[in-house]
């Protein structure tokens, strides 16, 4: 089994095995896109992160546990998680439309999403001492499907949390507020584990809500953390923590300015 592309046409999921070019030729697609290194012909607009997920199954044989023997089941199960992300995109799109048509400000700056790769899933299960199997990943991992909502201001994050809690069919299973209580390294974000209805099932989706500044810091910190042979790692970690604190102060100032402009505070 090679690269698998999950494509959503409206709300229907199409599994495309190994080579999407072969499939595309069968239906006469006439345009080209490159997504995660896979060339795709299509005549469906738009083709975006919201309706295309690319997962590479070529390395399953080298993974621990039962993944190599459960390739078909793994593919189908990850397809369900991809559907859950699509449901979240639909719900967020409906919310944005509702706010815009009501002449209300939308707190969403951007939305990113991903389905965890088989390699990442296997590594996380093994690292936590769990069996590496499809059944084990569904039972023990909450972040196979991930959605990140980026907002301009801190107030917007909490507004979005309230909107998510009020969405039909969405149940909040757990939450962690790393904005009011940052991690020791300076990381700030608001994490929710949601249960999303997908056809006759419910699927867990991790939702991370951040401001633009929080997302910038987390992206840079993640990149630096995984670089090899870092000299003075402890000093760099401390400098990153200081940067996070400076960004926090700047964000709070920007939020106060916005409130003044909006008439929420006296000038």
Image (tube, helix red, strand yellow):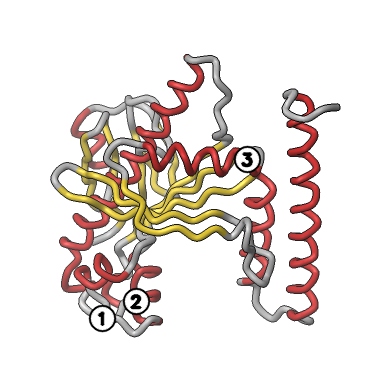
Residue 108, picture quadrant: top right
Placement of 230 over or under 218, stated as above or below: below
How many C-alpha atoms fall within 10 Å of the one at disc 3: few (<14), some, or many (≥20)? few
**Is the C terminus in the top left, top right, bottom left or bottom right quadrant?**
top right
How many circles with numbers are drawn on the protein?
Answer: 3
Placement of 120 over or under 151, stated as above or below: below
**Is the N terminus in the top left, top right, bottom left or bottom right quadrant?**
bottom left
Q: Position of residue 249 (x, y in %)?
A: 79, 52
Q: Nearer the viewer, mark 3 or mark 2?
A: 3
Left or right for 31, reference 8: right
Left or right for 59, reference 198: right
Discs 3, 2 touching: Cβ within 8 Å: no
Q: Position of residue 105 (x, y in %)?
A: 58, 24
Q: Earlier in the sequence, mark 2 or mark 1?
A: 2
**Disc 2: which residue:** 125
Placement of 174 over or under 153, stated as above or below: below
Discs 2, 1 touching: Cβ within 8 Å: yes
SS under mark 2: helix
**Disc 1: which residue:** 131
At x 41% / y 53%, what residue is drawn?
146
Q: For the residues marked 1 and 3, what is the alpha-carbon distance in whole angstroms?
A: 41 Å
SS under mark 1: loop
Q: Position of residue 192 (x, y in %)?
A: 44, 54
At x 55% / y 43%, what residue is drawn?
158
Numbered tag placed on residue 28 in the rendering: none
SS under mark 3: helix
Name the foreground residue: 131 vs 166.
166
Left or right for 133, reference 175: left
Q: Earlier in the sequence, mark 3 or mark 2?
A: 2
Numbered tag placed on residue 155 in the rendering: 3
Q: Position of residue 9 (x, y in %)?
A: 26, 31
């Amino acid at each position: 089994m090679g690269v698998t592309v999950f494509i959503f046409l409206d709300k229907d999921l199409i599994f495309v095995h190994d080579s999407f070019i072969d499939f595309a030729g069968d239906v006469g697609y006439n345009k080209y896109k490159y997504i995660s290194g896979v060339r795709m012909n299509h005549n469906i607009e738009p083709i975006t992160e919201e309706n295309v997920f690319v997962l590479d199954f070529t390395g399953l044989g080298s993974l621990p546990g039962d993944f190599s023997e459960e390739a078909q089941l793994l593919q189908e199960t990850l397809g369900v998680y991809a559907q859950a992300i699509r449901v979240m995109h639909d719900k967020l799109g409906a919310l944005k439309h509702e706010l815009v048509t009501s002449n209300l400000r939308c707190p969403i700056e951007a939305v990113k999403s991903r389905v965890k790769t088989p390699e990442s899933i296997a590594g996380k299960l093994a690292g936590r001492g769990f069996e590496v199997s499809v059944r084990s990943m569904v039972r023990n991992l909450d972040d196979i499907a991930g959605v990140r909502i980026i907002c301009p201001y801190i107030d917007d994050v909490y507004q979005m949390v309230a909107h998510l809690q009020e969405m039909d069919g969405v149940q909040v299973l757990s939450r962690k507020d790393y904005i009011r209580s940052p991690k020791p390294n300076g990381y700030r974000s608001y994490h929710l584990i949601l249960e999303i209805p997908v056809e006759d099932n419910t699927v867990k989706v991790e939702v991370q809500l951040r401001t633009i500044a929080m997302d910038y810091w987390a992206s840079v910190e993640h990149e630096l953390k995984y670089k090899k042979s870092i000299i003075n790692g402890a000093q760099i970690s401390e400098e990153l923590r200081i940067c996070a604190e400076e960004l926090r102060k700047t964000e709070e100032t920007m939020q106060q300015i916005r409130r003044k402009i909006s008439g929420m505070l006296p000038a």
